[in-house]
Amino acid sequence: MSDQIEDLIREIASKHGIAVARDDPILVLQTINNRLLQDSAMAQQALLDKFKEELEAISLRWQTDSKEKAERVLTAALATSKTAMEHLLHDGAMKAAKLTKSEVEKIFEQVLDRAREARQTALINLAASGLTVTGVLVAVFSMN
């Protein structure tokens, strides 16, 4: 502090050509001014520190909120995706079931057609056998 006062006395003497003593009231004002500047700087630093803490707290809160919102969006997207996949799987299963049913019905129709043909063949064979038996009986009775 005394170095500052000595520097100030020399500066006043060199710029203004006035000799100022250490007990001059102008130096008292300079000391008061320096003290006020120091106090003001400390108060501003305290305010800046408090502001920095508040900004960090807000940043942390925004980060937490953003993370929660992102998780909610992802959860909703996953749920929507799951629902869409379930619908697609259901639709695919229904189409596969319809196609399988159609193919089974076609095969069943073919089997029924073959069964009808086999029945007709069996009836024709039965009629032919009946005619053969009748012919044999007629031949046996006509020989007697």
Image (cartoon, grey):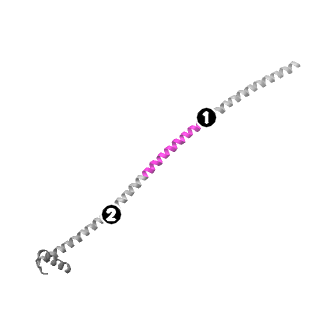
Instruction: Tell me what residue is drawn at x 58 percent, y 37 percent.
Output: 101
In the image, residue 119 above or below residue 96:
above
- Residue 43 visible in the picture: yes
> What's the amino acid at mark 2?
Ala
Residue 51 falls left or right of residue 83: left
Q: Could you tell me how far apart the alpha carbons at marks 2 and 1 are, in whole angstroms?
A: 71 Å
Q: Nearer the viewer, residue 34 or 64?
A: 34
Quadrant for the C terminus in the image: top right
Residue at image mark 1:
105
Query: Which label lies toward us, 2 or 1?
Result: 2
Give the image quarter of residue 117.
top right
Residue stretch in magenta: 75-103
Query: Residue, x 18% and y 78% (percent of image)?
Result: 7
What amino acid type should be assigned to the residue bearing mark 1? Glu
Question: Alpha-carbon neighbours of circle 1 within 10 Å: few (<14), some, or many (≥20)?
Answer: few
Q: Report x, y in % for residue 140.
A: 86, 21
x and y, in percent, of residue 79 in the image: 45, 50
Mark 2, Cα crowd under 10 Å, few <14 / some 14-19 / many 20+, is few
Closest to the observer: 11 or 70? 11
On-image quarter of the N terminus: bottom left
Q: How many marks?
A: 2
Which residue occupies the foreground of this view, 86 or 136? 86
Single out the residue that lies furthest toward the right: 144
Q: Which residue is mark 2?
A: 57
